[in-house]
Image (cartoon, grey):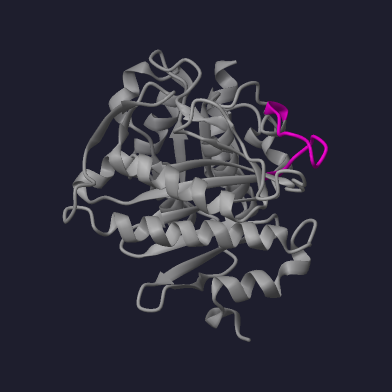
């Protein structure tokens, strides 16, 4: 069957042998994420018609106000993953602690995978009808199968991910993921409810002309980042570059991977450790970036090599096409 006409399910099955530990379990897990994505997309598309706008009135572990759709997406993905009986543990941005899952058979829990996720990235954009997304990261557990999941199962460096991806809920819904064999994107056909391979073998362009950063925080950034931003703005050679910033990591990364660009969320005097979460924002996007021929670092160290110490740990994050990242690192190295 021609790749361009494959559904997500057909693609997963036909590439099963290329998956790490090909036993069908990872396929089942990705299918669970696909189902939850369709449910969340349906709800997102009703924004403005039903009461899903605005704040829920609750504060999550990050100290951030939870939106109503944050809670809905969180519950939807957790339910879908639990029902597959493949996952032994979940970390979510919306949950204070990790969730231990016993399995449908409490006496025989052979689940091998843990999932870490941001159920609805950029959720504050919902109120103004701007794209949002879901980010997910999948690891094999490191504790013995059949035992209760432990925190160390989640605190693995990003290089040990077996799969990662995101769903973007925009003008169309897309699921983009990698299992370490390149990056592929699938667009939802809402008429029949199936994702079709629309963007095979995604790669960053060799050249990029977009930089994405919240310039409202410019005065709080390190000097090296300020200098790089000035470089992007300078009228010289093929510059100035174009500033594009949506405020949703998924949306900004997706555009930059397709069009060519760099995304930056540095440390600052406001957020000394950065603001993005290492485990379920930086690591999965870093995995995708590298598989698409780009780079992802904290400004000095490869993101996928950072050893996490807590499930909600924050980190500075820079990712994009290789040429732009190399230039950024020149500025970062001068500061040291």
Residue 270, image x, y percentages: 38, 15
Q: Is residue 263 visible?
A: yes
Q: Nearer the viewer, residue 123 or 316?
A: 123
Farthest-out residue, bottom = 1
Q: What is the span of residues highlighted in magenta in the rendered image?
A: 139-152
Whether residue 250 is visible, yes or no, is: no
**Closest to the observer, 14 or 159:** 14
Quarter of the figure that contains the C terminus: top right
Judge left or right: residue 50 versus residue 215: left
210 on left or right of 125: right
Q: Place residue 41 in its image quadrant.
A: bottom left
Q: Main secondary structure of the magenta part?
A: loop
Q: Tell which of 97 and 334 is nearer to you.
A: 97
| Residue at screen point 69% across, 75% down | 14
Where residue 279 appears, as percent x and y from the top left, is 58, 34
Q: Is residue 234 left or right of residue 177?
A: left
Across and down, in percent, residue 28 comes to 64, 61
């Amino acid at each position: 069957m021609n790749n361009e006409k494959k559904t997500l399910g057909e693609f997963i099955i036909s590439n099963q042998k290329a998956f790490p530990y090909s036993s069908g379990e990872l396929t089942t897990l990705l299918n669970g994420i696909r189902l939850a994505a369709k449910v969340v997309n349906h709800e997102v598309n009703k924004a403005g018609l039903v009461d899903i706008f605005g704040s829920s009135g609750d504060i999550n572990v990050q100290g951030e106000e939870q939106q109503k759709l944050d809670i809905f997406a969180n519950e939807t993905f957790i339910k879908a993953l639990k029902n597959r009986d493949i996952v032994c543990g979940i970390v979510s941005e919306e949950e204070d602690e990790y969730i231990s899952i016993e399995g449908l058979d409490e006496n025989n829990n052979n689940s091998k995978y843990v999932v870490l996720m941001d159920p609805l990235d950029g959720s504050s954009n919902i109120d103004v009808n701007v794209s949002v997304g879901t980010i997910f990261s999948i690891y094999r557990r490191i504790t013995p199968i059949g035992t209760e999941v432990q925190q160390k199962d989640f605190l693995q460096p990003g290089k040990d991910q077996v799969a990662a991806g995101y769903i973007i809920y925009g003008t169309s819904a897309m699921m983009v993921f990698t299992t370490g064999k390149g990056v592929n994107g699938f667009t939802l056909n809402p008429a029949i409810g199936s994702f079709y391979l629309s963007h095979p073998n995604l790669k960053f362009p060799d050249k990029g002309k977009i930089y994405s950063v919240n310039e409202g925080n410019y005065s709080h950034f390190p000097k090296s980042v300020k200098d790089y931003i000035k470089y992007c703005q300078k009228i010289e050679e093929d510059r100035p570059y174009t500033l594009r910033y949506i405020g949703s990591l998924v949306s900004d990364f997706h555009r930059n991977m397709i069009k060519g660009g760099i995304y930056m969320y540095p440390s600052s005097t406001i957020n000394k450790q950065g603001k993005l979460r290492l485990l379920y924002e930086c690591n999965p996007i870093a995995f995708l970036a590298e598989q698409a021929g780009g780079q992802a670092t904290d400004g000095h160290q490869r993101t996928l090599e950072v050893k996490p110490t807590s499930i909600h740990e924050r980190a500075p994050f820079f990712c994009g096409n290789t040429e732009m990242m190399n230039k950024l690192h020149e500025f970062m190295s001068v500061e040291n």
